[in-house]
Amino acid sequence: MRKIYIFDTTLRDGEQTPGVNLNTQEKVEIALQLERLGVDRIEAGFPAASPGDLAAVNAVARAVRNATIVGLSRSRTQDIDAVREALQGAEDACIHLFLATSPIHREHKLRMTKEQVLETAEAAIRYAKRYFSKIEFSPEDAGRTELDFLCEVVAMAIRAGATVINIPDTVGYMTPLEFGNIFKTLREKVPGIENIQLSAHCHDDLGMATANSLAAIENGADQIEGTINGIGERAGNTAIEEVALALETRFNHYQAKTTLNLKEIARTSRLVSKLTGMPVPANKAIVGANAFAHESGIHQDGMLKEKSTYEIISPETIGLVESKLVLGKHSGRHAFREKLIDLGYDLDEEALNRAFAKFKDLADRKKRVSDEDIRALIEEKIVETPEVYRLEKLRVSFESDSVPTAYVAIHVQGEGVREQRAEGNGSVDAIYNAIDALTGEEVELEDYAIKSVSQGKDALGEVHVVLAQNDVSAQGRGLSTDILEASARAYIDALNRLIERRKSPRRRDRMSLI
Ligand code: KIV
Ligand code: ZN
């Protein structure tokens, strides 16, 4: 069977999504889930960007055992040295070198001639070869590079020692026919191409990333690069789950498969969405909330008679299981444990006790606790941040014809409780003004989003915020049946993370890839 390798760049290109800023623990958590999903390679970051990025890549390298860990590097010795340091402790390491090759990038960004591009890339690959047996080289903006010159660059990279050649459609400009033709031409014309792996890296600016990746496979690509949920720069990258399911569902056509554990897809998608704060659109292929929903009468009728009338993938394939056991106020520990097993969670005794206490608290406020509620509770604090501030009490007064006020009490680590009353343009503004006064932190609220975790008036609400302070930003999440409480919790969570992040800042402009 022809295997297609999956190179996951959620933690690198995915993290370049505006507003996304993962801390080291979050990166490790996602990397471990990617390992469970069975991706072959994990691009953990760009170590030269900052000491914080380097440390995060190193933490991933030390945590993951069953995937190759990749570090990105410009074609410069300092960057290569940073990747060497970052990948210490990895079971299997690979460096990903890149240099732009298209006329637009050569002329306007690099100000280099073709010869200079060839020389710079070759020197970098030869230098990296001293330290790495696995080297991936990317001619950035390959899609818009003259095909003859691209063949020349790829031939040079192979001679210099690259083991994987990645072809990026950096700006998502290609059509499937054009992109497929690049792979066909490279396979036909470049000497030594049979000894390396060919990889495709697509962006979704014209909504063609998945189609282009599949065209690359049809024309000889061995590896697909992408991200979970398709997150990434601008319109994002190829969504890994889409390629994997296209290969699985249309095996008769592609005659190729990934070795992903497809049942981990739903959980991986949820985790990435939660930790990045990037909601998955309801109509997103494979992982959107509506991907398996059938609304119209005709479709529902067809589904009841025979599922294959309107369903080409079963929800179980990606690990979406609906457990039959309904939980509520009177459910005991045993039923709760059974439910967790049904939903695929394996908690130790201590975590189970904590989760059960949270469940009981929720069941007091909510008649029927759904599977989504339970997932939200379990996954709420996947990553623990030291709590400098903790919400103690919240009181909000709102009348449509007067100024909203909030009273907030927080517990400050090592000090005790502080309280504050404040006004605002709205209830959330009043709460945030009170918290600002309590903490003395000057922050900018860059993003605020709210969504309901399940259905019904008593549904759990999840708030996601992004706070910025100078060149450091952090996101926070809060969960509650009350959206004002969830808003306060999210803000305080983001403040705690900001304080943590200030200890090892990561540049916000870290991806000026020149
Ligand atoms: O899109 C791109 O060109 C990249 C390179 C760094 C491979 O992400
Ligand atoms: Zn990219």
Image (tube, rainbow, N blue to C red):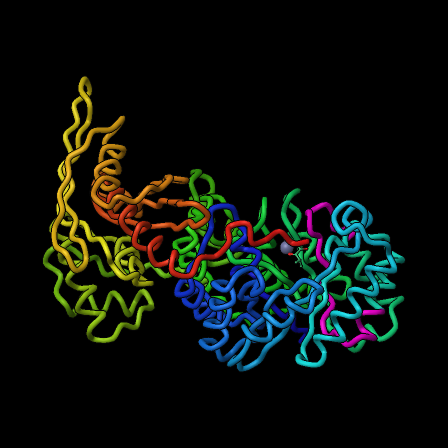
Q: Position of residue 266 (x, y in %)?
A: 43, 59
Q: Residue at the spot x=40%, y=45% of the render?
A: 468
Q: Is residue 497 left or right of residue 239?
A: left
Q: Is residue 471 left or right of residue 243?
A: left
Q: Residue at x 53, y 79 (%)?
A: 88
Quarter of the image where the N terminus is located: bottom right
Quadrant assignment for ligand 2? bottom right
Q: Is 481 situated above or below 181?
A: above
What residue is drawn where x is 74% and y is 72%?
A: 125
Q: Is residue 457 in view?
A: yes
Residue that lies at the very extreme toward the top in this rendered image: 401
State whether residue 354 is above or below residue 401. below
Query: Height in image: 212 above or below 430?
Result: below
| Residue 60 among those drawn in magenta | no
Across and down, in percent, residue 202 comes to 66, 54
Residue drawn at x 73%, y 59% as measured from the top left? 99
Q: Is residue 177 visible?
A: no
Q: Please identify the quarter of the rendering in which residue 67 is found.
A: bottom right
Count of labels in the image: 0
Which sits in the foreground, 486 or 384?
A: 384
Q: Which residues are magenta?
A: 156-179
In the foreground, 478 or 361: 478
User: Which residue occupies the foreground of this view, 290 or 151?
Assistant: 151
Residue 322 position, x and y percent, is 33, 59
Is 13 or 2 nearer to us in this picture? 13
Which x, y percent locates residue 10?
53, 59
Judge whether 192 appears above or below 463 on screen: below
